[in-house]
Image (cartoon, coloured by chain):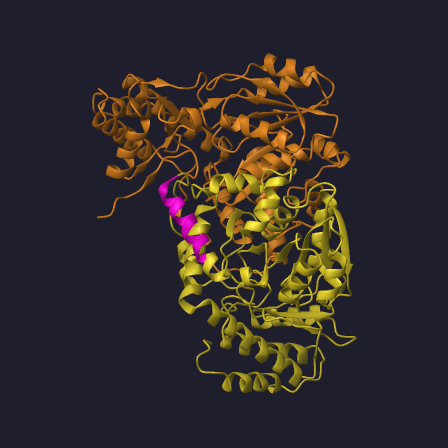
Chain colours: A yellow, B orange
Amino acid sequence: MALKDLLLTPGPSQVPDRVKLELAKPAWYHRSARFRTLYKECRERFQRIFETQGDPLIFAGSGTLAMEAAIVNCVAPGKKAVVVSAGKWGERLVQICDAFGIEKVVVKLEYGKSPTPQQVADAAKDPAVAAVYIHLSETSTGAKYDVKGIGEAVRKANPNALLGVDGISGAIGMECPLDAWGVDLFMCGSQKGMMMPPGLAVLSVSAKAWKVIESVKSHSYYACLKACKKNLAANDTPYTPANTLMDALNVALQMIEEEGPRNVLARHALLAKATRAGVAALGLELFPEHPNEVLTVISTQAGVDSGNVIKTARDRFGVTFANGQGDMKGKMVRFAHMGYVSATDILAGMAVLELSLKANGVNVKLGAGVAAAQDVIAQADKSVTL
Amino acid sequence: MALKDLLLTPGPSQVPDRVKLELAKPAWYHRSARFRTLYKECRERFQRIFETQGDPLIFAGSGTLAMEAAIVNCVAPGKKAVVVSAGKWGERLVQICDAFGIEKVVVKLEYGKSPTPQQVADAAKDPAVAAVYIHLSETSTGAKYDVKGIGEAVRKANPNALLGVDGISGAIGMECPLDAWGVDLFMCGSQKGMMMPPGLAVLSVSAKAWKVIESVKSHSYYACLKACKKNLAANDTPYTPANTLMDALNVALQMIEEEGPRNVLARHALLAKATRAGVAALGLELFPEHPNEVLTVISTQAGVDSGNVIKTARDRFGVTFANGQGDMKGKMVRFAHMGYVSATDILAGMAVLELSLKANGVNVKLGAGVAAAQDVIAQADKSVTL
């Protein structure tokens, strides 16, 4: 038998059969009532799932496009962006500012740390600051940021500043009710909590953000939000949308609504808790100070190259974990539990992690991590889907 | 029975079953040897199909992203772009220049016209002109541009200028050997001749263009070609690629190579000729002065709203043609024969066009267009695939 694959990377994540089969359907013409109905339906689903009255926009592209759009359209010349950088994705936000000559104030923290609301608010209090960019989940470290607390502190320090949140890996799997938490720009990609392959970028824009966008003369075309706004009234897009991908997205979002977005959050929280219990039982350390609900980032001990552990898992068992990025390569195993992930997936993943650690000379007791994860699951409220 | 769909729009175009089934396969991790092999394989296929030693780059996005990348990365401040505008897509090139504050010289022609090489060369002779942007096919009018002749004339007038060609609807179905014709920037989208759904943008970059790109400080990030170049040595992409779409693209390109790119061209030329013979036999006029091989744009007579003809074809027969865009709406039927299109498709399309014209009060002889198209096909060289 060929190896049976189990994908546990923090994006791309697994795609349900219902969604994959939708992708196999015929092409159709996108300048049509069928498209406008589809776009409206997807956007309304996002409004319910993200708990927002704002406008979720869908682009052909990957998450970085949503990041670029959220920055270039919202920070006028002479204004500043505050960016929290404590990992690879914070660095990407900084690079986008630099590429467009946007002045920035960087709250730089060590990899694995999360900012305090006060740290961000202090940087945002300069009235020239037009927007603050943070993550819900910093995918490179597994850190969770306190979006709610940061939003409150920033609004107190600078009521005009927009709050931009990179939800690329966190969205859907981590709590982030956009309107209640005052998120003005929510950036997402399709290949994580949305249970889709890569190819779509999503950016949800608040009424407060639209006012700013209308006043900013930005150098953008493919990422131009003013162009999106102009077409939105007719439920249309300025450029060719990836309409067949959007059909599949609609099915994925329907599945999320069938499960219930709050139940999806509970499932992620439980799987995260079970995974961490397993890690602790194996005597391993978590990398981030404040771990999030969509991926568990495990530090490997000195002298153990995490790349070897990951290779064993993949080559011998068909299980794919992700390595660290940049300087973190070889030092961590990123074990994701985001999107279309079940208890069986994380139990199998934990068992394979144990076997792969042992095969690479790490002294772990086989079954100890699995048992600890099982305990958490056994004690879970029966209402949580597994 | 539900209506059986026949998609004859100038993008999206039909997707073969082999490609659709590829899209239904599981997600997989993109930072992997598997991805690097795939990206290399797709790029090598493009090099053979496009007849180039240049670098075909693949982006998550639609064709407009390739246009933006071809412009913003190649025209430095103080330099100028020459843009031919004789339809909606020429206007898009102009808009992209404007969005990024790029100075432009517009060769503006009436809709449906094609520029002469001399017209373009005259505009390009200013030494401040860094690049010239034209179309292979202007999709909004069905016009064919003389890429070879324009390239020669431009190089004579301004040897340093780059030649950028929008091949979004023309690529693969129309002859355009990039290196022989001196095309430096070839912009494509997946949903036309590539037999794929929308979601991928392709830009092929020549060695001459790379030299310019390296010297230009552009405001771009998602569309940044320098970032692509940096990752290309490792067969990788700077941002999350749409890897499952690229798997399907690889299969589509394999099918094109199996048929033979020159045979694909011959099939398109024959189907275009047959469609035009049918149009002439019905006493209808072509809209463009120089029609191309990927779509036939038919002017409807005064008093006949082409939208009604298109609606009948779609609602009664399941055949989708495209209407005109902008001012051209209601005045034309765009009958595409691009990508995964066969003789049976265009014969059925012609028969339905006749029925739909007649149902909307146009006096056509049923069967006359089909018979004329059949004649062309019957006389075709037997080596041409149908």
Question: Which span of residues is magenta-colored?
Answer: A32-45
Which percent across, then down, holds residue B92? 55, 30
Q: Position of residue A330 (x, y in %)?
A: 73, 67
Given residues B363 and B350, the one toward you in this image is: B363
Q: Nearer the viewer, residue A193 or B370?
A: A193
Q: Does residue B21 appear in this view?
A: no
Check the image and report above or below for A116 versus A43: below
Residue at (25, 23) in percent of width and height:
B371
Is A261 drawn above or below residue B124 in the view shown?
below
Residue B372 appears left or right of B106: left
Rendered location of residue A116, percent (x, y):
72, 67
For the image, the number of numbered tags is 0
What's the residue at 20%, 24% (across, down)? Answer: B366
Q: Is residue B10 visible?
A: yes
Q: Main secondary structure of the magenta part?
A: helix
B225 left or right of B215 in image: left
Q: Position of residue B204 (x, y in %)?
A: 62, 36
Q: What is the quadrant of the C terminus of chain B in the image?
A: top left
Residue at screen point 69% across, 53% down: A93
Left or right? Give the position of B135 relative to B99.
left
